[in-house]
Image: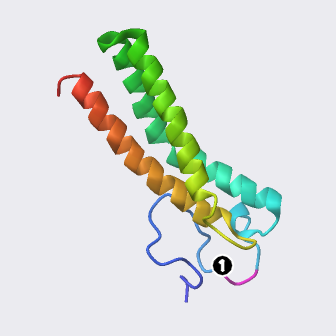
């Protein structure tokens, strides 16, 4: 079938070449190539795509924190985000085993980023008095 080899429950944001995944033929998508350089490229592309919303909300939160709480609040938020990134990356390191590890690791990172985005959005809304 056309969906052969695709993970069940795949959500939007991951692009698969139709009918090619799992056939052993390289699709041109680095996520389907076992070469380490392609797996790193796949993961980098996933991070950029999945963190866009997170970065947008985070920048809005920093801007609002400068208005609402000054440099001390901004510094606390920056440190909190650095700590969160380190924890997320550490937790997701074990995701994705074997030659085609990047897609699974990207999903792990994306899931955690989506939760963090919602958390930061609630904090931003609170600072704005919404």
Measuring 43% from the left and 74% from the top, which residue is drawn there? 9
Task: Label 1, secondary structure: give it.
Answer: loop
Task: Locate residue 92, reporting x and y percent.
Answer: 58, 57
Q: Indicate how the structure is coloured in the image.
A: rainbow
Measuring 76% from the left and 73% from the top, which residue is drawn there? 26
Task: Locate residue 91, reporting x and y percent.
Answer: 56, 56
Residue 49 appears anywhere in the view: no
Residue 87 appears anywhere in the view: yes
Task: Locate residue 117, reporting x and y percent.
Answer: 39, 42
Residue 56 painted magenta: no
The quadrant where residue 25 appears:
bottom right
Tell me: 59 left or right of 46: left
The boundaries of the magenta stretch are 20-24
Q: In this view, does 101 lie above or below 75?
A: below
Measuring 73% from the left and 61% from the top, which residue is drawn there? 30
Question: According to the image, label 1 marks what residue?
Answer: 20
Q: Nearer the viewer, residue 115 or 14?
A: 115
Q: Which of 27 and 123 is in front in this view?
A: 123
Tell me: 8 left or right of 103: left
Residue 23 painted magenta: yes
Tell me: 118 left or right of 81: left
Location of the N terminus (image quadrant): bottom right
Q: Around disc 1, counting alpha carbons within 10 Å, would you say few (fewer than 14), some (14 to 19), or many (20 or more)?
A: some
Location of the C terminus (image quadrant): top left
Task: Locate residue 83, reporting x and y percent.
Answer: 52, 37
Q: In this view, does 93 lie above or below 89?
A: below
- Number of dots carrying numbers: 1
For the stretch drawn in magenta, the main secondary structure is loop
| Furthest-bottom residue in this view | 1
Measuring 64% from the left and 58% from the top, which residue is drawn there? 93
């Amino acid at each position: 079938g056309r969906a052969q080899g695709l993970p069940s429950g795949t959500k939007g944001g991951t692009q698969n070449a139709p009918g090619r995944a799992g056939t052993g033929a390289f699709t041109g998508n680095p996520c389907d190539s076992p070469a380490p350089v392609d797996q790193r490229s796949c993961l980098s592309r996933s991070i950029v795509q999945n963190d866009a919303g997170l970065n947008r909300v985070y920048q809005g939160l920093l801007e609002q924190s400068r208005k609402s709480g000054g440099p001390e609040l901004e510094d606390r938020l920056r440190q909190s985000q650095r700590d969160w990134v380190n924890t997320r990356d550490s937790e997701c390191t074990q995701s994705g085993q074997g030659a085609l590890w990047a897609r699974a690791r990207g999903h792990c990172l994306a899931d955690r980023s989506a939760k963090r985005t919602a958390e930061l959005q609630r904090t931003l809304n609170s600072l704005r008095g919404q």
